Image (cartoon, rainbow, N blue to C red):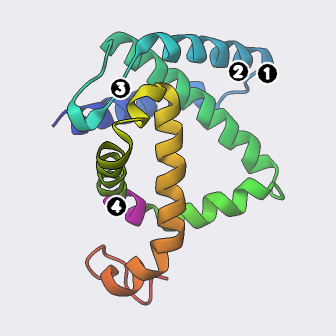
Amino acid sequence: LLRSAAACGFMGIGFFGANIFMGKTSVLKIVICILIFVIFVSYNGVVAMYSRTLAHPTIFLITGVLGTYILLNFCKYLKNDKEHPLIECLKIYGKKSIIILCMHSFLIEAIRLFDYKFFNDWLMTLGILEGILLTAAVMFILTLGMPFVEKYFGRTLGISEKGK
């Protein structure tokens, strides 16, 4: 329920704030937003939707809005630069997003269990670096495993042969 409420909140902010995002934005404004974002994220603490931990909900909301604003402006930049190498990467993962959404929580928990059993919760000691490493590990595993998941679980995930 908390995930749904947070998602609806951010979708609402995006819907009602769309005209702000569509306007022309100066580089200085983006840099200031990035600095504020980094400061607030480092101050906020642990945000873990799986355990319903938001640390400071107000700071979570502010960083969510700022992060969305920064990301949308970055996407506007990419839209104008059709030859950017990141465009291909985003296309690939965009088409596979249903697999990522369905599998990421399972993989994170499997990695954490492995870490707990064999490394005595070493990942927990890394702070914000834990999230970065978990994201990299999950994306690596999913990149290798996507063909398998599509082949054997495609219909379960709503991916038809025609939809490929």
- Disc sitting over residue 30 in the figure: 2
- Assign a secondary structure to mark 2: helix
The reply to whether dot 2 and dot 3 touch (C-beta < 8 Å) is no
Judged from this view, the residue extending furthest toward the left is: 1
Which dot, 4 or 1, sits closer to the camera? 4
Q: Check disc 1 and report its element: helix, strand or loop.
A: helix
The mark lying in front, picked from 4 and 2, is 4
Q: Residues within 10 Å of mark 1 (few under 14, many from 20)?
A: few
Residue under numbered circle 1 = 27
Q: Is residue 99 magenta-colored? A: yes
Q: Secondary structure at mark 4?
A: helix
Disc 3 residue type (three-letter): Val
Q: Main secondary structure of the magenta part?
A: helix
Q: Nearer the viewer, residue 60 or 162?
A: 60
- Residue 103 is marked as 4
Q: Kindly check if marks 2 and 1 are in contact, taking CB atoms under 8 A apart as contact.
A: yes
Counting other residues with Cα less than 10 Å from the Cα at mark 4, is it few (<14), some (14-19), or many (20 or more)? some
Of the residues shown, which amino acid type is indicated by label 2? Ile
Q: Nearer the viewer, residue 98 or 121?
A: 121
Q: Disc 4 marks which amino acid?
A: Met
Mark number for residue 47?
Answer: 3
Q: Which span of residues is magenta-colored?
A: 98-103
How far across and how far down the image is residue 10, in percent?
38, 31
